[in-house]
C-alpha cells in the first residue's frame, strides 16, 4: 500500500531522531492454565483502543506465567521490531520464566501488528500509539488487582516503555533494554536508506532488509549459531507505521519526567545502540530516584539470547527483588 504524502511528512519529522545530537475499561481474558514445573502458563488477551484508528478496539494476544503464590506485582514485557512475545520465552533463555519463578506475575504480549495481534493495515499504528496501548494494559492489570506493575521492553519495546512511563505513569519501575537516544551510524544508514524506502512500498517490511543482515546486527560472532538461526527464522514483518514514527524517538524529550526506579541493560557489543552512549542515557533520568545500568559482556543487541545474557537476566531479576516498589510473592 502506498501513502506518498504520509511518507514524506514522516521522513521530515523522523530524521531528527537519528541526529547526532470516560469510557468503560477494556477487558482482559485468560483461558485455562497449563501446569509446568513450579509454574503456570496460560494464554491471555487484552482489548485496547488503537488511537491511530480513531479508538478502534483491537485484541492484544499474549501469555501469562505465574508461580504457585499470588504475586502483588505484574511485569508486562514488550518486544522490539521484528519480534513477537516468544522472544521472552525462548527455550533455554526464558526471561519470562525466570521472572515468574522469582514470584512475579509475568505478561508477554504481541504488540499490535505483530504475531497474533493482528492489524490489517500496518500504517495504522505509531510509536506513540504503542505507548498509549501499553498504558491501557497497565491500567487493566491494576484493575485485576495487582498493586504494583513493572513495564519492561527491549529495543523499540524499551522506547515504548519509557514513553508510557513519562506520559502516563501508573508503573512502579521500568526496565528498558537495548535502547538509548543515540542510535548508531550504521542503524541510521540502514534505517533511512533501507527500511524507510521499503516502508514506502508496503505497510509491512522486513526490518534491516535481509535475514543475514539482521543476524549480523543483532548478534556477535560468539553467539550460538543454533540460537541465531532459530531467532532469524522466527522474525516477523514490522508495521510500516512504527518504522515511520520511531525514528524521532519521542521519549528523548520526556525521560526526565520519569519518577520511578529504572534498570537499564545493554549488550557491550550492540551494533544498534552502542554502549559508549549508555551512560549518557542513564543521566537523562534526572527525576528517577534510582537508575541502575547493567552491561552484558560479549553480547550484541539481542543479548537476552546469549550465554552471558542468562546471567544478565538473573541480575535484572535480583534488582527487581531488591526494590521495595516491586515485591514478589516469594519474599
Image (spheres, rainbow, N blue to C red):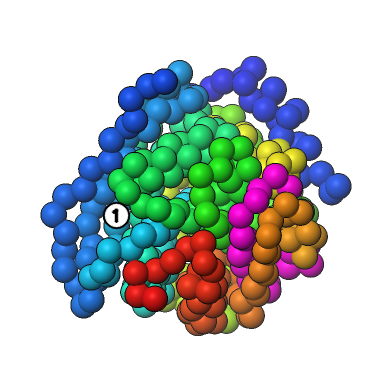
Q: Is 114 rendered above or below residue 99?
A: above
Residue 277 covered by magenta stretch: yes
Query: Can you give x and y, in whole percent of width and height, for residue 211 in the image?
Result: 51, 58
Which image quarter: residue 303? bottom right
> For the C terminus, which image quadrant?
bottom left
Which image quarter: residue 328? bottom left
Query: Can you give x and y, in whole percent of width and height, for residue 260 in the image?
Result: 61, 55
Is residue 141 visible in this depiction of the protein? yes
Q: Is 75 rendered above or below residue 60?
A: below
Residue at image point 41% right, 63% down: 88
Which image quarter: residue 279? bottom right
Residue stretch in magenta: 256-278
Closest to the observer, 323 or 226: 323
Closest to the observer, 94 or 318: 318
The furthest residue to the right: 21
Closest to the observer, 55 or 174: 174
Query: Can you give x and y, in whole percent of width and height, for residue 256 in the image?
Result: 73, 47
The reply, left or right, for residue 195 in relation to residue 111 is right
Residue at image point 16% right, 63% down: 34
Residue at image point 67% right, 27% down: 10
Residue at image mark 1: 63
Closest to the observer, 104 or 221: 104
Q: Is 158 rendered above or below residue 25?
A: below
The furthest residue to the left: 32
Q: Residues within 10 Å of mark 1 (few under 14, many from 20)?
A: many
Is residue 108 visible in this depiction of the protein? no
Label 1 secondary element = strand
Query: Can you give x and y, in whole percent of width and height, for residue 270 in the image?
Result: 66, 67
Residue 257 covered by magenta stretch: yes
Count of numbered marks: 1
Amino acid at each position: 500500500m502506498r501513502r506518498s504524502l504520509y511518507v514524506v511528512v514522516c521522513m521530515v519529522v523522523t530524521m531528527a531522531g537519528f541526529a547526532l545530537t470516560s469510557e468503560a475499561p477494556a477487558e482482559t481474558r485468560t483461558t485455562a492454565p497449563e501446569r509446568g514445573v513450579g509454574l503456570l502458563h496460560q494464554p491471555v488477551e487484552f482489548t485496547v483502543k488503537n488511537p491511530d484508528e480513531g479508538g478502534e478496539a483491537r485484541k492484544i494476544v499474549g501469555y501469562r506465567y505465574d508461580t504457585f503464590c499470588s504475586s502483588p506485582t505484574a511485569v508486562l514485557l514488550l518486544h522490539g521490531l521484528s519480534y513477537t512475545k516468544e522472544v521472552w520465552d525462548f527455550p533455554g533463555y526464558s526471561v519470562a520464566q525466570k521472572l515468574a519463578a522469582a514470584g512475579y506475575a509475568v505478561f508477554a504480549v504481541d504488540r499490535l501488528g505483530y504475531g497474533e495481534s493482528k492489524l490489517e493495515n500496518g500504517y495504522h499504528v505509531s510509536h506513540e500509539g504503542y505507548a498509549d496501548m501499553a498504558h491501557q494494559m497497565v491500567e487493566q492489570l491494576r484493575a485485576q488487582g495487582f498493586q504494583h506493575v513493572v513495564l519492561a521492553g527491549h529495543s523499540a519495546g524499551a522506547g515504548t516503555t519509557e514513553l508510557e512511563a513519562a506520559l502516563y505513569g501508573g508503573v512502579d519501575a521500568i526496565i528498558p533494554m537495548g535502547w538509548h537516544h543515540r542510535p548508531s551510524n550504521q542503524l541510521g544508514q540502514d534505517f533511512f536508506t533501507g527500511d524507510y524506502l521499503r516502508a514506502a512500498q508496503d505497510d509491512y517490511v522486513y526490518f534491516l532488509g535481509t535475514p543475514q543482515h539482521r543476524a549480523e546486527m543483532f548478534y556477535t560472532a560468539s553467539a550460538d549459531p543454533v540460537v541465531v538461526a532459530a531467532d532469524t527464522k522466527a522474525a516477523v514483518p514490522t508495521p510500516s507505521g512504527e518504522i515511520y514514527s520511531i525514528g524521532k524517538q519521542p521519549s528523548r524529550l520526556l525521560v526526565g519526567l520519569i519518577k520511578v526506579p529504572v534498570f537499564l541493560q545493554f549488550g557491550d557489543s550492540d551494533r544498534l545502540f552502542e554502549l559508549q552512549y549508555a551512560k549518557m542515557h542513564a543521566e537523562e533520568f534526572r527525576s528517577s530516584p534510582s537508575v541502575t545500568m547493567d552491561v552484558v559482556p560479549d553480547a550484541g543487541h539481542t543479548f537476552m539470547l546469549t550465554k552471558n545474557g542468562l546471567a544478565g537476566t538473573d541480575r535484572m531479576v535480583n534488582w527487581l527483588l531488591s526494590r521495595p516498589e516491586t515485591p514478589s510473592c516469594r519474599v
